[in-house]
Image (cartoon, rainbow, N blue to C red):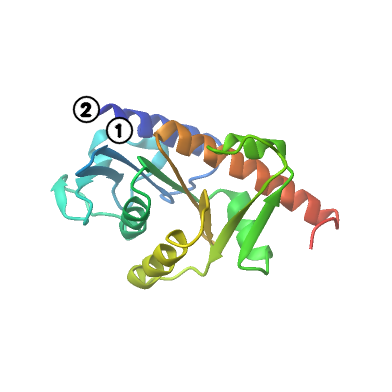
Amino acid sequence: MYSEILELIELGKEFQRRNWVPATSGNLSAKLDEKTICITASGAHKGYLTKDDFILIDIDGNLIEGSKKPSAETLLHLTIYKALPEVRSVLHVHSPNSTVISILKKNKEIRLEGYEILKAFAGINTHETSIEVPIFENSQDMNELSETVKDYLTKKKTYGFLLKAHGIYTWGKSIREAAINLEAFDFLFDCELKLQKGGLQA
């Protein structure tokens, strides 16, 4: 079994413990090489993953190996890989913090600034900075949604994006980096929600 699949299986268990992937939500992927991507199949519970819950596809989504159905959101993973060639892993979860904040925030982007934890993101070495996290309307039309995401990623720098009432996508140059980003985002969203509850955020 590929080491990347083993790593994603362990992450799935951790994400379940954190209540980030309830029921069969979320999807996890990684590049095995420049031509091959492994991704969780549709309907797979991320807390109980086995190697049979993964399929192998190429960068255009053609099936290479596996008998299960690809997730409908496979196209979003491929869009990220194509727009950001350095990315080696894409993680998507339905964590409560990312889901709730995507609904409560009225703007199309969340601005995160001044937090020390921002230094968890690659290339940031000071808290005196800010990042923007776009919020896209959720859609069952994956082609249309993927075009929207592609357009944003080719124009602006970001470390992740939210789908309204759906959750977060983030990525990294390794599975570990993507997982660190996910943890940092969850902390940041939790802080933002607490500030909003206290009347300190618009």
User: Measured from the top left, where is residue 143 in percent x and y?
Assistant: 33, 70
Would residue 162 be found to the left or right of residue 141 on screen? Answer: right
Which residue is labeled 2 in the image?
A: 1
Secondary-structure class at tag 2: loop
Secondary-structure class at tag 1: helix
Q: Which mark is residue 158?
A: none
Viewer-proximal residue among 194 and 117:
117
Report the quarter where the N terminus lies.
Answer: top left
Q: Residue furthest right?
A: 199
Would residue 53 be found to the left or right of residue 179 on screen? Answer: left
The residue under label 1 is which amino acid type? Ile
Please report the residue visible at 29 percent of the width from the left and 34 percent of the height from the top: 50
- Callout 2: few (<14), some (14-19), or many (20+) C-alpha neighbours within 10 Å? few
User: Measured from the top left, where is residue 153 in percent x and y?
Assistant: 45, 59
Viewer-proximal residue among 118 and 63:
118
Place residue 62 in its image quadrant. bottom left
Viewer-proximal residue among 57 and 46:
57
Judge whether 22 appears above or below 18 on screen: below
Would residue 13 be found to the left or right of residue 202 on screen? Answer: left
Place residue 7 in its image quadrant. top left
- Callout 1: few (<14), some (14-19), or many (20+) C-alpha neighbours within 10 Å? many
Q: Which mark is residue 5?
A: 1
Place residue 108 in its image quadrant. bottom right
